[in-house]
Image (cartoon, rainbow, N blue to C red):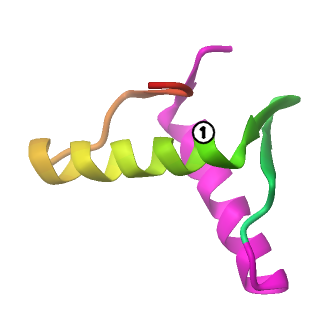
């Protein structure tokens, strides 16, 4: 798996936020369909998606796991 669908990405972000709210810190990794995405990669993904939304005015269809 080299990329996530928008639905998979949103679910991953929701789980990260829930973890942060419960434990006060970000998880070391996120699991998406059995694939581990390490913290530095999911932070990069979130930053790239936010930049895309600001520049393009819409959500991407897919999100690459690594830039």
Residue at 65% over, 50% down: 11
Relative to residue 57, is residue 33 drawn left or right? right
Callout 1 secondary element: helix
Give the number of marks: 1
Residue 5, position in %: x, y?
Answer: 53, 28
Residue 62, position in %: x, y?
Answer: 43, 26
Work out whether 50 lies above or below 7.
below
Q: Relative to the observer, which residue lies in front, 29 or 21? A: 29
Residue at 48% over, 41% down: 45
Residue at 73% over, 61% down: 15
Q: Relative to the observer, which residue lies in front, 1 or 40? A: 40
Image quarter in which the C terminus is found: top left
- Badge 1 is on which residue? 41
Work out whether 3 lies above or below 29.
above
* Residue 34 quadrant: top right
Furthest residue toward right: 34
Magenta region, main secondary structure: helix
Relative to residue 29, is residue 9 drawn left or right? left
Image quarter in which the N terminus is found: top right
Relative to residue 8, is residue 60 drawn left or right? left
Residue 4, position in %: x, y?
Answer: 57, 27
Relative to residue 36, is residue 57 drawn left or right? left
Furthest residue toward front: 40
Work out whether 8 lies above or below 4.
below
Q: Which residues are magenta?
A: 1-25
Count residues near mark 1 (Cα–Cα under 10 Å), then give few for <14, some for 14-19, many for 20+.
some
């Amino acid at each position: 798996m080299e990329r996530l669908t928008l639905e998979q990405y949103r679910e991953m972000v929701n789980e990260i936020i829930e973890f942060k709210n419960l434990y006060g810190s970000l998880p070391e990794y996120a699991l998406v369909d059995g694939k581990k995405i390490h913290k530095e990669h999911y932070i990069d993904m979130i930053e790239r998606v936010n930049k895309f939304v600001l520049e393009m005015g819409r959500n991407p269809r897919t999100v690459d796991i690594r830039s």
